[in-house]
Amino acid sequence: KAAGRNNYAIFGEHMDELLRNRRRLENDLRSAVSTRSQLEVFYQPVFSTSGGTLCSLEALARWKHPTLGYISPDQFIPLAEEIGLIGEIGAFVLDDACKTMIALPDITIAVNSSAVELGSTDYARRVLTTLNKWRISPERLEIEMTETAATDNAGDLERTIAKLRTAGVRFAIDDFGTGYSSFSRVQKIEVDRVKIDKSFIDEMDRSDSRALVIAMIDMARAKGLKITAEGVETAEQRAALESLGCDDLQGFLLSRPLPRDAAVAFASRARLG
Ligand code: C2E
Ligand code: CA
Ligand code: CA
Ligand code: CA
């Protein structure tokens, strides 16, 4: 019993600390977003398998916390969604992406959009206003959404996607294969590309995972969609994906995400070479 009470005390203390940390992180994120000084956008190059040229960059948000250092978007994006800051972060990333597109006139940029953003009624209008402000052709923007986003509140989402696609913006299903409703739902939603999730690429040396990748590629092909493989880390994976007919490859083997200046320099070199 004594031990039980003791455990409870430790657990309680631990909870207190977790809550305090969480509240501190929330406040820090609020000020990071309002001042924008700690937010950055990194860009990861994506290469086409035909010719091996750099074809696009994926914009990835970064939060450089003053004392904790870089905090992963896997941590702060869900927090931002919960406390209502995701719209501002998305707008910041899109603005930065437009500046990068101006620096690299031949390149397409992909941004990530969460279900919360895509579900908001004025999202399409805000994206088109931003593109127009920077005089960027909508065809140069691709919006990546997860399958979970694609299955959430279908009504508004479909309208948002239709409005943006009519204007020329492209859409990709991110982390393809990981959503439990996957294939059937994806059939219903109009997109241009699927990005096969890293978890499948990681295990491609196993025949069952390889079969899954082949099934995903076949399905995407049948629908006329482009296919990107993400998280490509080895030369073996690259060769296998090329021979299976993936259109584009992305991963640490080819390049890590880079700060804008480095990405611009990298892309300029990649086009020459
Ligand atoms: P994601 O969209 O699936 O992005 C790919 C993630 O995999 C990135 O992590 C990237 O750095 C990492 N990655 C790429 N190639 C490799 C590889 O070869 N090996 C390994 N181990 N990792 C690789 P990152 O930048 O930490 O982003 C994590 C997630 O946070 C993203 O996953 C995306 O869902 C979300 N995210 C990032 N930026 C934004 C944003 O601006 N808005 C929203 N809504 N979500 C964002
Ligand atoms: Ca993505
Ligand atoms: Ca992904
Ligand atoms: Ca992911």
Image (tube, rainbow, N blue to C red):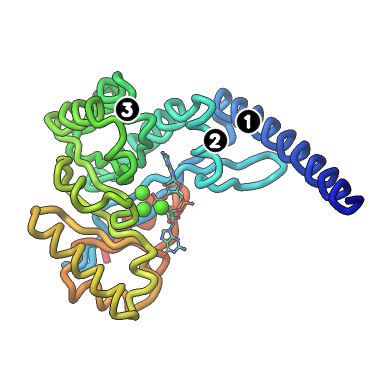
Q: Where in the figure is residue 112, as x and y percent of width and height?
A: 36, 41
Q: In this orientation, does residue 103 appear? A: no
Foreground pick, 273 / 42? 42
What is the C-alpha distance between the residues marked 3 and 2?
A: 17 Å
Q: Secondary structure at mark 1?
A: helix
* Residue at x 29% of width, y 30% of height: 153
Q: Where does residue 160 sit, x and y in percent of width and height?
A: 22, 27
State yes or no: discs 2 and 1 in contact (Cβ < 8 Å). yes
Amino acid identity at mark 3: Gly
| Mark positioned earlier in the residue sequence (3 or 2) | 2
- Where is mark 3, residue-wise? 119
**Which mark is on residue 79?**
2
Answer yes or no: disc 1 within 8 Å of ligand 1. Answer: no
Q: Would residue 179 appear left or right of 186 to someone viewing this image?
A: right
Disc 1 marks a residue whose amino acid type is: Glu
Q: Residue furthest front?
A: 1
Position of residue 259 measured from the top left corner of the image (x, y, whole percent): 47, 49
In which quadrant will I find the C terminus? bottom left
Q: Disc 1 marks which residue?
A: 26
Most distant residue in the right direction: 2
- Position above or below: 197 against 65: below
Classify 237 as above or below 57: below
Kind of residue at badge 2: Leu
Q: Earlier in the sequence, mark 2 or mark 1?
A: 1
Q: Does residue 173 appear left or right of residue 187 in this picture?
A: right
Of 165 and 5, nearer the camera is 5
- The residue at the point 85 percent across, 43 percent down is 9
* Mark 3 and mark 2 residues within 8 Å of each other at the beta carbon: no
Q: Which mark is residue 145?
A: none
Residue 123 is drawn in which quadrant?
top left
Label 1 neighbourhood size at 10 Å, few (<14), some (14-19), many (20+)? some
